[in-house]
Amino acid sequence: MADGDGRREDDDMAEEMNGRIQDDNDAEEGGGVPYDFAIEEEDVIEIVTDDDSVDNYESGDDDETVGEDDNAEQFDVTLPSRHTYLGETQELRGRTMQDENDYITIPLLHDNNLLMNLVLVPTQTLPMTVFHPLNISMLRNVIAKDRTFGIVHTKHIEGGGSEMAKYGTTAEIYEYQEEEGSGALSIKAKGRQRFKLISTRREMTGLVVAQVKILPEIRMENPFEMMRLQSLDKMLLSPPVEEEAGKAPRAGYLDEVRTPKFWHVRRKNAWLTPWPSWVYNQYDDLLLTRKVISELEKSTMIQPHLLKVPCDPQELSHWAAINLPLHDSHRMTLLSLNTPTQRLRYILSVLSKCKMLSCIHCTGTIANTADIFSMSVEGPQGTFVNPQGYVHEMLTLTKATNLSYYGRPSVEYSWFPGYAWIVATCGRCHNHIGWKFTATKRKLKPQKFYGLTRKSVQARLAEDADEGEMRHVI
């Protein structure tokens, strides 16, 4: 909360938030802050900020390094994942899992405006604040039963209509809070299982109910072991017992699972099979996992050893879909794939081509993917909700360019405790891009960073390809 000395009078505060646009080089007048991208519009404070120069922007050249100062106070990266800005919540115990390939009927939370056309992925955290009586009633019934509802991406089509996607994800509520004054209901939910949409119906109350098929998670065995010529088994070289493929763990640290000795033996054994070893390597999920993690380290500032980056192929395929700036079409393709091997191959093909982030409206350059880093233990892209109920998926970066700012920094309802936020727009077309966050303490590191909302930016691929051309990698 802001200190009393830092508060302005109501008139001055409204003038600051609604009558001023401040960009990197000079200020110009602008309009108010729309509800959908303001975190909170009430209290503002004065803090020390050092403005960035757009002209001096270069990827990889920053004036500070996270954790470089021994006396610095490092930000607690577990705070954003707790969503403490929602207040005290009541925890729900237990977990509901549906059997794979089962047909079930679940209610759909169908609010395109508040969800910002969210494509929910398994294991993704979804905080929400709902005000509509229909949605509140539905969620109350869900909490009383199995705590599970469905999220399906809806896209706008020509003519002003909308169309539901064929695939979606179940969400399970694990915490909730009912606000007495406003009557709103706040929840924290987790994406659980992928499903295929079979049919929908709208009840008399307006609630949308869907029949869905729970999609299976298929783990492919080691392709080399499956495709080898068994008649030539007697000629195969055998690695040490502890390194045998059949006895190697399916999860854990990759260096313990695939050793240099293992790959040496495997290359020679491939001489006795129909295909060379590099063919099998393309479909080895553990090797694909290593390649994805290596690409993350090479192309971004993400440090997997400091985060909860999973080493299990299935978990990593979902983690990457959540945390990378993928287009909705890419996410929908990933939801339709039933094996982590296919998903990891698809992610790797996109990740290797993703270099720049641009405004989705005017295509102006906003940031370099090399400047992506994580302010949360869950990863660089998190899901947050503002007081008006608008859900944003936000990607954190150390640098951004071509931005203009609305108003003055505020700490109210901050998604990152200890940081003040200010609304950022594209300096070229003035559409909302995200926020700039600045530390309220001089010793807190990093001193500043940027949060870009996923709905307003797109990854510019080195070699643009449409969805049909990308599918060949599967």
Image (cartoon, rainbow, N blue to C red):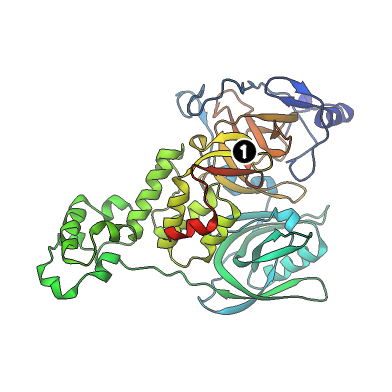
Residue drawn 48% across the image and 35% down it: 370
Mark 1 neighbour class, 10 Å CA radius: few under 14, some 14 to 19, many 20 or more: many
Q: Is residue 78 above or below residue 312?
A: above
- Position of residue 15 in the picture relative to residue 56 (left or right): right
Residue drawn 52% across the image and 78% down it: 101
Residue topped by disc 1: 451
Asked which secondary structure carries label 1, the reply is strand
Residue drawn 54% across the image and 63% down it: 335
Q: Residue furthest left?
A: 235
Whole-percent x, y for residue 170 in the image: 60, 66
Is residue 356 something one can see in this rendering?
Answer: yes
Q: Nearer the viewer, residue 201 or 402?
A: 402
Q: Which image quarter: residue 90?
A: bottom right
Query: If the image is split into quadrants, where does the C terminus sit?
Result: bottom left
Q: Residue furthest bottom?
A: 103
Q: Which image quarter: residue 432?
A: top right
- Position of residue 384 in the picture relative to residue 377 (left or right): right
Q: Which image quarter: residue 190?
A: bottom right
Q: Is residue 199 above or below residue 88?
A: below
Q: Nearer the viewer, residue 128 or 92?
A: 128
Q: How many labels, in total?
A: 1
Whole-percent x, y for residue 448 in the image: 59, 29
Q: Residue furthest right?
A: 11
Is residue 304 something one can see in this rendering?
Answer: no
Query: If the image is split into quadrants, where does the N terminus sit?
Result: top right
Q: Is residue 17 above or below residue 291?
A: above
- Position of residue 226 in the picture relative to residue 327 (left or right): left
Whole-percent x, y for residue 26 in the image: 73, 20
Residue drawn 75% across the image and 51% down it: 389
Whole-percent x, y for residue 104 in the image: 61, 78
Q: Amino acid at mark 1?
A: Gly
